[in-house]
Image (cartoon, rainbow, N blue to C red):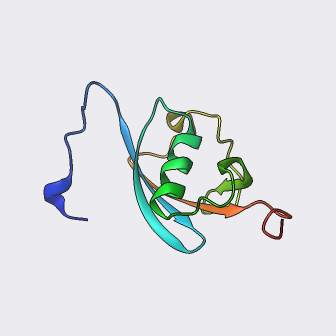
Amino acid sequence: MKNSEKKPESDHGADFVEITMVVNGQPVVIKAVEQQPLHVARQKALEKTKNLAQPPENWEIKNEAGEPLDPDKKVGEFGFGKEVTLFLSLKAGVAGV
């Protein structure tokens, strides 16, 4: 990522979190608004990585410790700070369906 691509912190009063979402080993960077639910970032990551065969709700979001995160909670509620790495993987039992 180039520094020249960084936007000012205050964009219409919203705070952003830069999420590196690792989808099946493929990292993609998503700028998420703290007031949006986490599932919005999940959807963007799936679209960017073209992982559209399974519905978004079949994908589990985990933090670096491997703990599942609630996709309906707002991004700001997790206290990620300005940058975080999260992992997306299909929930157990879904991949072979």
Residue sitting at the far left: 4
Residue sitting at the far top: 13
Q: Quadrant of the C terminus?
A: bottom right
What's the residue at 41%, 52% (across, down)?
Answer: 30
Which residue is at the front of the view, 51 or 63?
51
Where is 38 relative to 83, above or below? above
Give residue 17's quadrant in the image. top left
Task: Report the number of numbered marks.
Answer: 0
What's the residue at 81%, 62% (across, down)?
Answer: 94
Which residue is at the front of the view, 11 or 48?
48
Where is 48 relative to 78, above or below? below
Residue 25: horizontal and vertical position, in percent?
Answer: 56, 75
Residue 54: horizontal and vertical position, in percent?
Answer: 69, 58
What's the residue at 25%, 32% (across, down)?
Answer: 11
Where is 95 relative to 38, above or below? below
| Residue 16 located left or right of residue 92 | left
Residue sitting at the far front: 53
Residue 10: horizontal and vertical position, in percent?
Answer: 24, 32
Q: Quadrant of the N terminus?
A: bottom left
What's the residue at 17%, 59% (across, down)?
Answer: 3
